[in-house]
Amino acid sequence: MASETRGRRSKVDLLPANIRKRLDSGLRNGSIQQIDLLDEINALIKAAGLPEEQQLSRAGINRYATKMEAVGKSLREMREITQVWTAELGDKPTGEVTKLILEMARSQLFKALLNESETGEGADVGMIKDAMLAVQRLESAAMASHKREKEIRTAFAAEAANAAEKVAKTAGLTSDAVALLKREILGIA
């Protein structure tokens, strides 16, 4: 059956944006049964003045719902995996998190290209390109934030060292003891 429709867009793909949006919303929401949603969508198709051939069948809406659920499941799984790994890598250098995100993007690109070759549907290369650009910008912002945080910590450590040196000298500690205090506790030579 798949070979019969290869290269031909489905009826759902041919729906006007507002009707398809309502279909997608009804399927995501889940509060309405498919048969009721089918009746509503077909009524919208009729009201829009589209030909009767454009009306969806039970099998057609079920195929589309199954496809959308598979996509949704994949997105939910990816989101869960991302949460696990970012929690794991949260205190690691931003480069490690970026490597993970880039690997996920490569995986999605591979899946999209594989889907394109199997179904004849075009991969959304623009979306993938935008996602990669967003990753680049996020990494740049993360690196700038990391650099700024490091500068703040260094400045704070220097202030703490100066304050500790003053207190230690007033308490009668020797220069060697002050240097040891700065090196061992504050991490400053």
Image: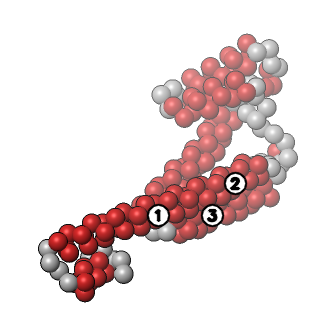
Instruction: Report if the CB atoms under discs 3 and 1 are less than 8 Å apart.
Output: no
Between 83 and 97, which is closer to the camera in this rendering? 97
- Residue 21 horizontal/vertical position (percent): 65, 28
Could you tell me which secondary element the residue under label 3 belongs to? helix
- Residue 72 horizontal/vertical position (percent): 56, 46
Which residue in the structure is indicated by mark 1? 151
Amino acid on which the number 3 mark rests in the picture: Leu
Residue 60 in view of the camera: yes
Q: Which mark is residue 102?
A: 3
| Gap between marks 3 and 2 measured at Cα | 11 Å
Residue count near mark 1 (Cα–Cα under 10 Å), binned few <14, some 14–19, many ≥20: few
Q: Along the horizontal axis of the image, is 92 left or right of 177? A: right
Residue count near mark 2 (Cα–Cα under 10 Å), binned few <14, some 14–19, many ≥20: few
Could you tell me which secondary element the residue under label 1 belongs to? helix
Kindly identify the residue that appears in the image at 64 percent across and 54 percent down: 137
| Gap between marks 3 and 1 measured at Cα | 28 Å
Q: Which mark is residue 133?
A: 2
Residue 12, picture quadrant:
top right
Q: Along the horizontal axis of the image, is 10 left or right of 84? A: right
Callout in the foreground (2, 1): 1
| Gap between marks 2 and 1 measured at Cα | 27 Å
- Residue 140 horizontal/vertical position (percent): 61, 58
Between 141 and 84, which is closer to the camera in this rendering? 141
Callout in the foreground (3, 1): 1
Mark sitting earlier along the chain (2/1): 2
Q: Along the horizontal axis of the image, is 152 left or right of 63? A: left
Mark sitting earlier along the chain (3/2): 3
